[in-house]
């Protein structure tokens, strides 16, 4: 039987992962094992990710994560454990090098977006972010008066993420936009060279290159021009969060982190929102859409994934809104985590 590792994490994580498990139960027949990660793991074991939890995740068929972090664990002490180390450790330990973040504003949420409806109309893009290289993982130096972060990329790291992007584009609208800063950075010049070479293996896919500052502007000025965006770790981190706001709320954006033959990691993009934890008002829809990605990209269950996505769209079309999505427009009704979960289950 298919086995799924559940990592609720911190803040609203236990609430949204609990709701996500109910959606999984409605979509198929799975077994589960729940583990601590992030701040919860720091409190219990002194580290954000134990070897035992990583080992259990490796033995699973897929991993569903809630969120990690919170002010309780904030520190500037470089030697102190941080919740985010749990997420980075999972990505590294599971060999996850590709983060996929689809951005498709729901027609029912047009009023929730800070963008004008005519700007976001037709937007359906996928950000493919490289996860294991770049400045986040480079050598770090620090003295009393200076600090440094070393940005390094190997050609094979760029090639494998580029192939994920081109293969994804082949199943979509066959357009890849590679984002870099090749006018300044040597790593970006290598990035552009390697992506251009990989593109020759996908003649049916159109490739264009764009500088990251221009990409940031185009995402808010003309987002429908993009199909698949592929970029390095830090640029992808920033641009995918920017793109998320096209949907009106980080509470609507799912993600998948994929690698080789091991399990994928699926999680909502939003944070742990400790200020609303335990109040029953958290938006679980990004977790439900992450469940859909888990079913499709992690387990190959495309029909079940589509059912979950249709159920979420149907509930939004009825006017149900959690607080982060509400605009008080006519026909909207504010609901909490439990009611919107029950309604999605009913639609399923």
Image (cartoon, rainbow, N blue to C red):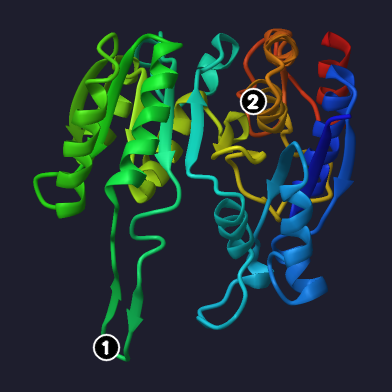
Sort mark 2 into few (<14), some (14-19) or many (20+) by Cα contacts within 10 Å: many
Q: Quadrant of residue 106?
A: top right
Q: Quadrant of the C terminus?
A: top right
Q: Position of residue 153 (x, y in %)?
A: 29, 53
Q: Position of residue 79 (x, y in %)?
A: 55, 83
Residue at image coords 14%, 45%: 189
Nearest to the observer: residue 344 or residue 46: 46
What distance separates the C-alpha of mark 2 from that of mark 1?
45 Å
Which residue, given by chain and number where applicable, does mark 2 sit on? Answer: 293
Nearest to the observer: residue 106 or residue 184: 184
Q: Quadrant of residue 246?
A: top left
Determine whether, in the image, residue 36 is placed left or right of residue 255.
Answer: right
Q: Position of residue 290 (x, y in %)?
A: 66, 30
List the single residue furthest toward the left.
183
- Nearer mark to the viewer, of 2 and 1: 2
Nearest to the observer: residue 144 or residue 121: 144
List the single residue furthest toward the bottom.
144
Residue at image coords 61%, 29%: 252
Determine whether, in the image, residue 76 is placed left or right of residue 331.
Answer: left
Q: Position of residue 179 (x, y in %)?
A: 25, 35
N-term mark: 2 or 1:
1
Residue 31, placed above or below residue 137? above
Q: Quadrant of the N terminus?
A: top right
Which residue, given by chain and number where applicable, does mark 1 sit on? Answer: 145
């Amino acid at each position: 039987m298919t086995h799924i590792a559940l990592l609720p994490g911190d803040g609203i994580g236990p609430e949204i992962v609990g709701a996500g498990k109910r959606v999984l139960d409605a979509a198929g027949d799975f077994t589960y094992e729940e583990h601590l990660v992030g701040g919860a793991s720091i409190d219990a074991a002194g580290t954000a990710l134990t070897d035992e939890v990583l080992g259990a995740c490796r033995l699973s068929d897929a991993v569903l994560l809630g969120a990690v972090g919170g002010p309780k664990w904030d520190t500037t002490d470089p030697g102190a454990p941080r919740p985010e180390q749990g997420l980075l450790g999972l990505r590294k330990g599971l060999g996850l090098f590709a983060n996929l973040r689809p951005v498709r504003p729901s027609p029912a949420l047009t009023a929730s977006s800070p963008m004008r409806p005519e700007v976001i109309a037709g937007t359906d893009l996928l950000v493919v972010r490289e996860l294991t290289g770049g400045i986040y993982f480079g050598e770090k130096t620090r003295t009393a008066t200076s600090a440094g972060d070393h940005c390094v990329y190997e050609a094979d790291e760029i090639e494998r993420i580029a192939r994920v992007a081109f293969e994804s584009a082949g199943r979509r609208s066959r357009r890849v936009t590679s984002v870099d800063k090749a006018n300044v950075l040597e790593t970006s010049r290598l990035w552009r060279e390697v992506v251009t070479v990989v593109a020759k293996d996908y003649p049916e896919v159109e490739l264009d290159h764009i500088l990251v500052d221009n990409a940031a502007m185009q995402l808010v000025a003309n987002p429908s021009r993009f199909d698949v965006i592929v970029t390095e770790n830090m640029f992808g981190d920033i641009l995918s969060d920017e793109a998320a706001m096209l949907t009106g709320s980080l509470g609507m954006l799912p993600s998948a982190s994929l690698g080789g033959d091991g399990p994928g990691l699926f999680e909502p993009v939003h944070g742990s929102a400790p200020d609303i934890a335990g109040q029953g008002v958290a938006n679980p829809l990004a977790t439900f859409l992450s469940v859909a990605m888990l079913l499709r990209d992690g387990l190959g269950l495309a029909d079940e994934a589509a059912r979950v996505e249709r159920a979420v769209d149907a509930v939004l079309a009825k006017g149900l809104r959690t607080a982060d999505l509400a605009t008080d427009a006519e026909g909207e009704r504010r609901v909490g985590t439990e009611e919107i979960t029950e309604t999605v289950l009913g639609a399923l």
